[in-house]
Image (cartoon, helix red, strand yellow):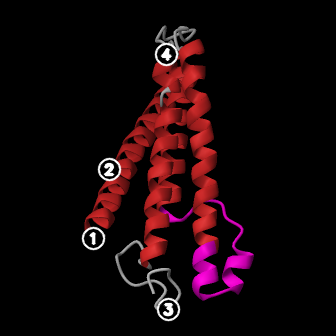
């Protein structure tokens, strides 16, 4: 279990670093576009298109990371009211639902990429599969995080490897 927790933490750090780099690139391109537009009455061809595609990448990767950190959108009213094995069961159900939704999106994204991925981007003239591939990648990462969280619920460990629910996990 310790190796799995270290793997998850390493994966999260790597993805956060990658997202930070992409956000920094977005910031630089945005600043350059603003300076070019208002300072020189000019623009960079494909600049706005690049920003859109980079934003798609940060969204897909950020969604997976937020699931890994437990920061995803969640209505936890019921889960906060219960304790023990029922709370653990509700958490498992939550991650199963999130995993199934991502599995469905992954399943449908592959034919979508096959059918529309060969088209070229209007300005940059890159194949759209380069942009679209982040959808199944992000969904796959989200599924991995869900599986790790489900396993952790069975064992009763939190993200730091410490016992989370002393007498409420399925490991008891």
Q: Which residues are magenta?
A: 69-89
- Badge 4 density bin: few <14, some 14–19, many ≥20, Cα 10 Å: few
Percent x, y for residue 108? 62, 30
Residues under labels 2 and 4: Cα distance? 30 Å
Say which quadrant the N terminus sits in.
bottom left
Q: Nearer the viewer, mark 1 or mark 2?
A: 1
- Badge 2 density bin: few <14, some 14–19, many ≥20, Cα 10 Å: few
Residues under labels 1 and 4: Cα distance? 48 Å
Is 80 covered by the magenta stretch?
A: yes
Indicate left or right for 136 with 105 as reference.
Answer: left
Camera-nearest residue between 147 and 8: 147
Count of picture labels: 4
Indicate left or right for 129 with 3 as reference.
Answer: right
Label pair 1/2, CB-CB below 8 angstroms? no
- Residue highlighted by disc 1: 2
Percent x, y for residue 92? 57, 68
């Amino acid at each position: 279990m310790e190796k799995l927790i270290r793997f998850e933490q390493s994966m999260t750090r790597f993805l956060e670093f990658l997202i930070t780099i992409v956000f920094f690139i977005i910031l630089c391109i945005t600043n350059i576009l603003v300076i070019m537009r208002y300072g020189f009455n000019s623009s960079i061809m494909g600049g706005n298109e690049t920003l859109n595609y980079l934003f798609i990448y940060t969204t897909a990767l950020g969604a997976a990371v937020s699931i890994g950190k437990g920061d995803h959108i969640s209505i936890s009213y019921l889960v906060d009211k219960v304790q023990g094995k029922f709370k653990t069961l509700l958490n498992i159900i939550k991650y199963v639902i999130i995993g199934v939704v991502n599995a469905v999106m992954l399943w449908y994204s592959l034919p979508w990429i096959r059918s529309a991925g060969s088209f070229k981007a209007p300005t940059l003239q890159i194949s759209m599969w380069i942009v679209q591939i982040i959808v199944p990648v992000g969904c796959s990462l989200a599924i991995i995080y869900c599986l790790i969280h489900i396993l952790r619920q069975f064992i009763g460990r939190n993200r730091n490897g410490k016992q989370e629910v002393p007498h409420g996990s399925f490991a008891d």
